[in-house]
Image: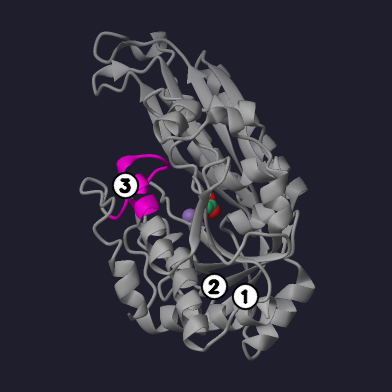
Amino acid sequence: MSHSSHLDDLAGIGRDSRRGGYSRHVFDAAELELREWFTAEASRRGLSVEVDRNGNLWAWWGSPGPGAVITGSHLDSVPGGGAFDGPLGVVSAFEAVDSLRANGFTPSRPFAVVAFAEEEGGRFGVPCLGSRLLTGAISAERALNLRDGDGITFADAARRAGLDPERFGRDDVALERIGTFVELHVEQGRGLTVPVGVASSILAHGRWRFTFTGEGNHAGATPIADRRDPMVPASQLVLAARRAATGGARATVGRLVPNPGGTNVIPSTVDAWLDARAPGSAETRSMVEEITAAAGSAAADEGCEVRVVEESYGDTVHFDPALRDELAEILGGVPALPTGAGHDAGILAVHVPTAMLFVRNPTGVSHAPAEHAEPEDCAAGVVALAAVLEHLAR
Ligand code: GLV
Ligand code: MN
Ligand code: MN
């Protein structure tokens, strides 16, 4: 089967008619259907499927074991996301297995395709939840108590999906099996001008929740001077983020939720989430401090309060330079490029040799329905991934 037809198999799963694109969130109906697809694809190839203690899926070619070559990505999406972010890496992994087999290759090291759970943090707010749990970057207690927009805890959602929350947490057995991890991913900017490249680094990045509290009241009957409207400092947060993000830094308020959320209602509270990223940790931290200070003074001016909670943070990732160069060379000297996007590979890179392959994105659009990669570039991605895996697992 051609490359694009495999991604096409997923085209009908989790379409979001309201937002456009796809909404596939951990343990929701669409994501469970993708998990079934993963299991079926693995079984069809005689790979043995394992759901690990943290809800990550593994498809083993041969027996699981230490020193394994692991490839894959994630199946979940952002709300209203594109078709490629995540699934491309999983689909390409299965296709690389097919291609290796077609060439008569059998790995001499343990080998698996993986799909990590809740990479986007689209449902429970913390990105790379599956890989963070596996590596101990987040405690089971904190993860299990995270709540989705409907107040359902991660523990309850996992239980409903047939997992045992008691078993969640750092999984040394799973971690020690990983010899090398390679994640193929659609590029998310316009940095790649050839079909395939390798990743050099990931920006330091995190998420902060700002809760502004004022006084709920009537939009018509309350004189301006009498208001304590939390939307006013929340809007200053948005502007402060834009002002503070200079140089290579990025700051975004992509989600802002007024409570109760009525057109003729001054909200009593507003929750706003800041996503902040910069090349270095110190830079990221000082940008967030600047934004927080601006939000604090805007809140005070309006007679409101603001509470800030750090929901996730990850330092700059520099992918293993030797592995990066080795893979770039195998691929004929493809370019290495940094990315502003987070990945499970970034979480794993702290523990095991990790690399990423990027497939060109002609427009640079990602986390949006228009995200795209050309079929020929996706096919080149599979060829590159197969070459890399063959090299690592031989
Ligand atoms: C994940 O794609 C992120 O960069 O937030
Ligand atoms: Mn993403
Ligand atoms: Mn991704």
Residue at position x 41%, y 62% in the image: 43
Quickly name the residue at label 2. 358
Closer to the camera: disc 2 or disc 3?
Answer: 3
Quickly name the residue at label 3. 30
- Check if residue 24 falls in the magenta segment: yes
Name the N-terminal-most of marks 2 and 3.
3
User: Could you classify mark 3 by the number of other residues whose Cα lies within 10 Å: few (under 14), some (14-19), or many (20 or more)?
Assistant: many
Quick one: 76 or 334, which is closer to the camera?
A: 76
Q: Which residues are magenta?
A: 21-36
Q: Quadrant of residue 75?
A: bottom left
Q: Amino acid at mark 3?
A: Ala
Up the image or down, 282 lies above or below 382; here it is above
Q: Amino acid at mark 2?
A: Phe
Residue at position x 49%, y 72% in the image: 190
- Quadrant of image for the C terminus: bottom right
Q: Amino acid at mark 1?
A: Val
Asked if marks 2 and 1 touch (Cβ < 8 Å), the reply is yes
Quickly name the residue at label 1. 198
Rendered location of residue 170, percent (x, y) = 69, 39
**Is residue 237 found left or right of 176 in the rendered image?**
left
Q: Looking at the image, can residue 294 be seen?
A: no
Element type at mark 2: strand
